[in-house]
Image (spheres, rainbow, N blue to C red):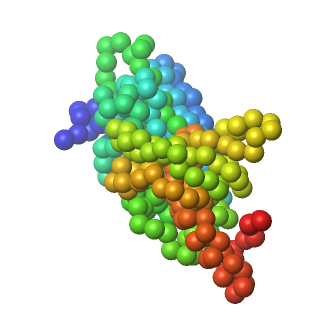
Amino acid sequence: MLSPMLASLLPLLLLCRISFCQYSSDQCSWKGSGLTHEGHARDVEQVYLRCSQGSLEWLYPTGAIIVNLRPNTVSPAAARLSVCIKPSADSTGTNIYLDRNGKLRLLLRDQDQAQGKVQCFSIREGALFIEAVPHMDISRRITAFQYELVSDRLGPEARSLGAPCQPCSDAEMLLAVCTNDFVARGSIKKVEQEEEHSSVTVEISRLYRQKTQVFASGGVRVRSWTGHIKMPLQCRVRSGEGEFLFTGTVRFGEAWMGCAPRYKDFLRLYHEAQQQGTNPCQVDTD
């Protein structure tokens, strides 16, 4: 059931697809205010964000905006991307829909945004249609979220920001070492079950790569790192002895597990691929 305000905006939404909207230039982040067009509450502004990550902040929302999230390069692989958004803890004042060719699907209600839960969807599902919820006093209302474009390697499981629970194939394992946000050799120290995910405490003996500092150094003279890697609850991860090769993605500053073979199994696979000349990249295994 569409709200009266949203129903009144639908004709304008269709016109936006022709030419009758305000447009914002391409950028990574956007900050706007409903006060700038308070007298034009039925205006729909088109916003284009063309980066792999960024943010949006809409102060005192009125009317509606359409947010188009796209990569900054043109590639067939772009169609296989997913978009993840994480509302801020004080985000309020709007309902957020997915808009695909004028057909709307509710993604986040006004009252649900403050929970800060990450929502992911395929980039092919359309743009974000953000509709202001009418209030007598809009002075305390701000809609804000971070966004990231992520690989569809996660597929539908991207909605929980975790990799599929089934083991990676040999090809996926080798590719993960070359392309993932972090690659590290280490051991599992503790597994804690949290409300919506598991948190794996790891100690790292060899850090090959980290996109951001998700693993903290033990000190200048200590060649070890510690950190936490998240996994979906349904994966039922357990503590295990021995060394693993941890790979995965960093989402909104948090590490999420991808492929995590035992290190001895990775070594065997890597050397076999090396002999066959099928390694996608070189790794120092000494």
At x 63%, y 76%, the residue is: 268
Q: Nearer the viewer, residue 37 or 104?
A: 104
Vertical placement of residue 24 versus 159, above or below: above
Give the residue at the far left of this rendering: 1
Q: Nearer the viewer, residue 62 or 40?
A: 62
**Relative side of 248 to 134, left or right:** right
Give the residue at the far front of this rendering: 241
**Relative side of 136 to 267, left or right:** left
Q: How many marks?
A: 0
Give the residue at the far right of this rendering: 221
Vertical placement of residue 64 versus 284, above or below: above
Residue 257 visible here = yes
Give the residue at the far bottom of this rendering: 276
**Relative side of 233 to 36, left or right:** left
Q: Position of residue 240 (x, y in %)?
A: 48, 56
At x 42%, y 61%, the residue is: 164
Vertical placement of residue 240 versus 137, above or below: below
Q: Position of residue 32 (x, y in %)?
A: 54, 27
Residue 23 visible here = no
Q: Position of residue 52 (x, y in %)?
A: 61, 49
Q: Nearer the viewer, residue 151 or 256?
A: 256
Q: Position of residue 51 (x, y in %)?
A: 62, 47
At x 75%, y 35%, the residue is: 219
Please identify the quadrant where the N terminus is shown.
top left
At x 77%, y 65%, the residue is: 286
